[in-house]
Amino acid sequence: MSQYYTGKYTYDSSSKQFYWVNAFAAVPVICFGFQCHVTSVAVLAEMHNPTLKRFAIVTALSTLICTVIYSVTGAYGFLTFGHSVKSDILVNYNPKDGAATAARAVIVVVVFSTYAICHFVGRSAFLGLWIKLRKLTVHEIEVWENKRRIVTSLVWFFSSLGLAIVVPTIGKAIAIVGGFAAHFIFTFPGGLVLLWASPVVS
């Protein structure tokens, strides 16, 4: 915000023409954000005295905070850089800019604090599918549990690290993941409803 008012950064206002259909490009981003609700079960389990009311309050406050922060960031990013704003807005700023450096440090803290819970959800889903496909017994599950967790954690970490190095911008990653998220949000549940309703119709 301060960079916009100081006028330190300028842009060419005629660099790109905006069309209303470009607004649909935000759909994968919205779906990507909605997909983050998969961590809600773990959050509820870690709450002190978890109740539906307390969980609803936490969810509402978290959503409100994220909405305000992202809306303000997006608005001032567009006001500062116009159509030349990047999907990763920090790329637009000078690497030597102190405010941008502080923002990058905060993002590192956010990634460190959220990576574990996102990995927990992905690991649980993968191991659940693995156990079901291999038809493991209770004894086999308990014997190899620690090794499975270590292997999946290492594979998950280095895979995400490799993708972060290879993928040029976060916008492309969000577009791809958002596309998959849209499928799981809209197509997959609809298919399950049709599958559930088919015996009733017949």
Image (tube, rainbow, N blue to C red):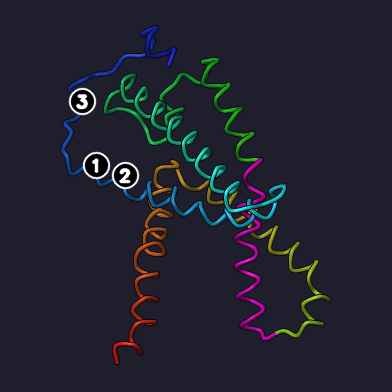
Tell me which secondary structure the magenta stretch mostly adopts: helix
**Dot 3: few (<14), some (14–19), or many (≥20) neighbours within 10 Å?**
few
Total marks shown come to 3
As drawn, the label of residue 23 is 1
x and y percentages locating residue 14 in the rendered image: 17, 22
Q: Nearer the viewer, residue 141 or 50?
A: 50
Disc 1 and disc 2: Cα gap in Å?
6 Å
As drawn, the label of residue 26 is 2
Q: Amino acid at mark 2?
A: Ala
Q: Is residue 3 above or below residue 27?
A: above
Instruction: Tell me the SS state at disc 2.
Output: helix
First in sequence, mark 1 or 3: give its number.
Answer: 3
Disc nearest the viewer among 1 and 3? 1
Disc 2 and disc 3: Cα gap in Å?
21 Å
Q: Amino acid at mark 3?
A: Ser
The reply to whether callout 2 and callout 3 are in contact (CB within 8 Å) is no
The residue tagged 3 is 15
Q: Is residue 31 above or below residue 106?
A: below
Q: Residue furthest top?
A: 6
Magenta run includes residue 10? no
Residue drawn at point x = 28 percent, y = 18 percent: 11
Give the quarter of the figure containing the N terminus.
Answer: top left
Image-based side of 60 in relation to 50, left or right:
left
